[in-house]
Amino acid sequence: MSMFDFEAFDRAALRRDPCDFILVPGFVTPEAMQAINDDYPAITAAGNFPPEDLTHGPAFQTMLDELNAPEMKARFAAKFGMDLSDCPMQLTVRKYADASDGNVHNDSRSKFLTVLIYLNKEWHAPGGQLRLLRDPDNINDYVVEVPPVDGAMLAFRRNEQSFHGFPEYVGERRSVQFYWVKRKRAARQQKRGGLGLWLKRLRKIRKR
């Protein structure tokens, strides 16, 4: 049985403004949410971490395996009408946000499709909710706002208007984010290895 609600995925409307995107509340099933959170990596710092650098339990690994399966890529490619056949996936895991996160930005052109899955069990804070923006200079002018809770999933296709960010939040904010990217980007990051990621994390920890 899948950890994901593909009926909800299929029902979700593909919206076009400011970019092609879908929002699927409860994309992760309630049963899977509990198991994934029980086996969540013991991350202690803010930042995005590749799963191969983390220790986690079997349910979390099952989720990663399903996300990396060819069938998952095929579903997203069909939903967005994209050819992702030559696009590798890059995936990272987050547990904490700090004050330097959430700044409004647009993804680089090397990312074709971005997917975020949120894994908090509850959310009461006004900050920390991702927004797709109409105006990159006004975080309060947004098309959609996503509470990072209950297995919600947001996926969007990068274009010149796909700016996003969230109002400041410091604390636990669990998410898995992945991208299908240009092959050159994947090769370049693999060549650089873990040094760049280590330095990035070190800078974040020093800011705390």
Image (spheres, rainbow, N blue to C red):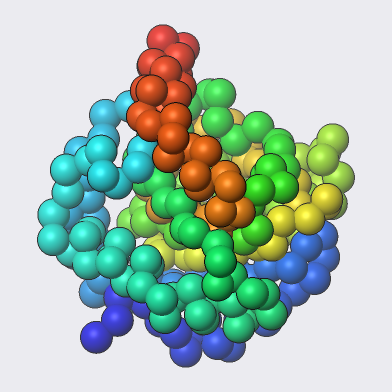
The answer to whether residue 44 is left or right of residue 189 is left
The answer to whether residue 105 is left or right of residue 207 is right
The percent coordinates of residue 63 (x first, y second) are 28, 66
Is 205 situated above or below 116?
A: above
The percent coordinates of residue 118 (x first, y second) are 43, 56
The image quarter in which residue 59 lies: bottom left
What residue lies at 28% left-to-right and 66% top-to-bottom?
65
The percent coordinates of residue 48 (x first, y second) are 42, 37
The image quarter in which residue 49 lies: top left
Is 171 situated above or below 147?
A: above
Among all residues in the image, which is located at the extreme top? 206
Quarter of the image with the N terminus in it: bottom left
Q: Count all numbered tags in the image, as a single digit.
A: 0
The residue lying toward the viewer, choosing from 102 and 192, is 192
What residue lies at 51% left-to-right and 80% top-to-bottom?
74
Q: Is residue 47 visible?
A: no
What residue lies at 32% left-to-right and 71% top-to-bottom?
66
The percent coordinates of residue 71 (x first, y second) are 42, 81
Quarter of the image with the C terminus in it: top left
What residue lies at 38% left-to-right and 23% top-to-bottom?
195
Is 1 situated above or below 55?
A: below
The answer to whether residue 77 is left or right of residue 70 is right
The residue lying toward the viewer, choosing from 178 and 47, is 178
Q: Is residue 117 visible?
A: yes
Among all residues in the image, which is located at the extreme left? 58
